[in-house]
Image (cartoon, rainbow, N blue to C red):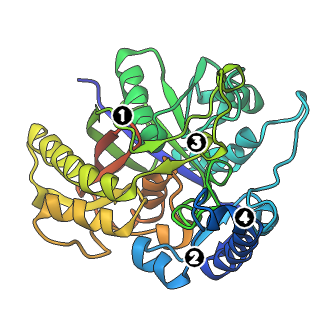
Amino acid sequence: MVAVVITGTGLFTPEESISNAELVASLTEATTTWNTDNAQRIEAGELEARHVPVEEFIFKASGIKSRFVMNKEGVLDPTRLRPILETRSEDQLGIQAEMAIPAITQALAQAGRNASDVDAIIVGASNIQRAYPAVAIEIQDSIGAGGWAYDMNVACSSATFSIQAAVDALRAGSANCVLVINPEITSAHNNFELRDFHFIFGDACTVTVLEREADAIAAEQWSVLGTKLATKFSNNIRNDFGFMNSSEAEERDAHELIFRQSGQRVFKEVCPMVAAHIRDHLEATGLQATDVRRFWLHQANLKMNQLIAKGVLGRVPDEDEAPVILDTYANTSSAGSVIAFHKHRDDLASGDVGVICSFGAGYSVGSVLVQKSNN
């Protein structure tokens, strides 16, 4: 089998950040106004009163303290509760392409490559800003890369699914240097109006460079020991926004056209599914849980990550074994596990093994087993 390596990663972090306290203050004002405006309908039983958020609950429930966003002003405006993003003309670079550029520059520098070396680009994200032309092709054009490019969507698992697609392309010989890009503007699909959801998401963009080991020149390389994907249908995480909305016979509830989930069901069903997935992947690759030096898990919820790692290790991991970035980044969908890998790998020694794992709507789960080596 052709050996494939990760030779670089990059990260774009928005300049603006929102603390839990700021988020709670904004939603409290908005909720109080909504309840007052709808008092008669609430009294008549036509509507349920909305609950005021509690700051202490957010960190206890999720491990999140703050989140980076592309636009803070709109999110914190109690009369808007969603970001204000620039409307761009067709001759302007799209916002997802724009946020990818600095991360690409960083990743290629690590890999010792130039944009002209790139001959394949896969953009994977929970939401793509338009149907076509593909954001990946826009990025390809903007950096002067060759080859081919396409977009894909497997929600929060888009990064690991994209990585497997890149590995397959490299092994098949249809690409020589692949960029996997995960530009997540999750603030634009989040529901900031309801306390169960308003704290969950943040924005970021990650880039991963993959090449065949025989071609790689990077000082630090991560051998891909194996990839494994799985999906199982569930409505427990859903977003119904799509091109048919305007043609549907009945008008949709606006809350159906953005992120929503049944959190407790997701927790109970996804955690054992992911833990079993990782165990099976390790076993199929001839590895044991004790062989894994670090788990870079999808940064959705601290308790979920701890339970999943416990299902693999038989105990709750410490932060060195399963580092956390969601305290400052929140849930960045597909970018989360790659952010953890990007920020928490330098201290590992040559030969150390790690697991990059993401999971989410679908249900979907993807794992990538990697081993550090120095060129």
The three-letter amino acid code for the residue at tag 4 is Asn
- Residue drawn at 60 percent across, 22 percent down: 149
- Residue drawn at 59 percent across, 62 percent down: 194
The three-letter amino acid code for the residue at tag 2 is Pro
x, y percent for residue 252: 64, 35
Marks 3 and 4: which is nearer the front?
A: 4
Between 25 and 188, the residue placed more toward the observer is 25
* 1 and 4 marks in contact (CB < 8 Å): no
Marks 1 and 4: which is nearer the front?
A: 4
Vertical position of residue 308 compared to residue 240: above or below: below
Q: Which residue is mark 3?
A: 256
Q: CA distance from mark 1 to mark 4?
A: 62 Å
> First in sequence: mark 2 or mark 1?
2
Q: CA distance from mark 4 to mark 2?
A: 18 Å
- Secondary structure beneath label 4: loop
Between 319 and 22, the residue placed more toward the observer is 22
> First in sequence: mark 3 or mark 1?
1
Residue 38's disc number: 4
